[in-house]
Amino acid sequence: MNRNFLTGIVLVAAAVVSSGCVSTGTFDTMQTEKDDQIATLQQQKAALDKQVAAIQQDNGSLNQQLAECNRQNTAMQEQIGFLGQQRSVLLEANRQHQQQYDALVKDLSNEVKKGQLQVRQYKDMLTVDLAEQIFFDSGRATLKAGGKKILRKVGAALKGYQDKIIRVVGYTDNVPVAKSLQSRYPTNWELSVARATTVVRFLQDSGVPPERMVASGRGEYDPVASNDTPEGRQKNRRIEIMLIDKSLANEMEKSVH
């Protein structure tokens, strides 16, 4: 009986020892596996942290881009508003110019119908073209009676344009001044300037402020038709009265200087 008891104890002890050795190996294996899993998870977490940092950085960049887009949008809205105001100003100016043109044509309608003058509109300028033969004899710069009558009416119409500079320009054909007149007008230059000056002085006497007027001559060097025919030469002999906005006249003056 004692022998059997001892044998049992030995077997149990052997089993316990054997069981203890297997558990330790399994634990080490499991621990190694867990360590590997932890290391892997830590690597994955580090990668995720980098991704989060990158996303946050991209988000900051996107926020900056969004802010810049908003700033540009605001600037564009302001520019659109400013351009809209300019458009309204231009439309109003165009309306006023059209009214001025219509009023001038109406005031001088009889003379226009008779072909004694022509009224033209171009952007910020109004132009009255006067037929030379009605105002001056050939080679002369003295106003004829019929020309004076028309110029009085033109002067009365021009008085109302306080915002305009009045530029009077004389033109001739290419026929040289007669020798008998060359002592006074050596070339068509002098003749064209003298005619423009005569018109300016007459307009001044008619009540147009002289500080608003400019006289100049182009001679034969700005023809509107061919000088090869009598009809063409007649068109080239003319007096041009231009009504120019003061702001535009100032810009033209600056560009010259």
Image (cartoon, helix red, strand yellow):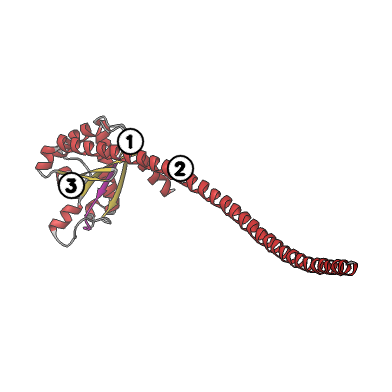
Label 3: few (<14), some (14–19) or many (≥20) C-alpha neighbours in 10 Å? many
Q: Earlier in the sequence, mark 2 or mark 1?
A: 2
Q: Nearer the viewer, residue 205 or 169?
A: 169
**221 or 54, nearer to the observer:** 54
Q: Residue furthest front?
A: 1
Residue designated by label 3? 132
Q: At 51% from the left edge and 48% from the top edge, which residue is drawn?
A: 66
Q: Position of residue 77 (x, y in %)?
A: 41, 42
Q: Residue 215, how many percent across, how many down?
A: 31, 43
Foreground label between 3 and 2: 2
Mark 2, residue position = 74
Give the SS element for disc 3. helix
Residue type of the residue flagged with mark 2: Thr
Q: Which residues are magenta?
A: 166-175
**Mark 2 vs 1: CB contact within 8 A:** no
Which label was assigned to residue 212?
A: 1
Determine which of the numbered discs, if any, sits on residue 77 in the image: none
Q: Give me the residue at 13% from left, 43% from top.
A: 116
Mark 3–mark 2 contact, CB under 8 Å? no
Q: Residue at x 45, y 42 (%)?
A: 74
Instruction: Name the residue located 81 percent from the left edge and 69 percent from the top edge.
Output: 18
Going from the N terminus, do you reach mark 1 or mark 3 first? 3
Could you say whether the residue bearing mark 2 is in a helix, strand or loop? helix
Is residue 213 visible in the rendered image? The answer is: no
Where residue 161 appears, as percent x and y from the top left, is 27, 33
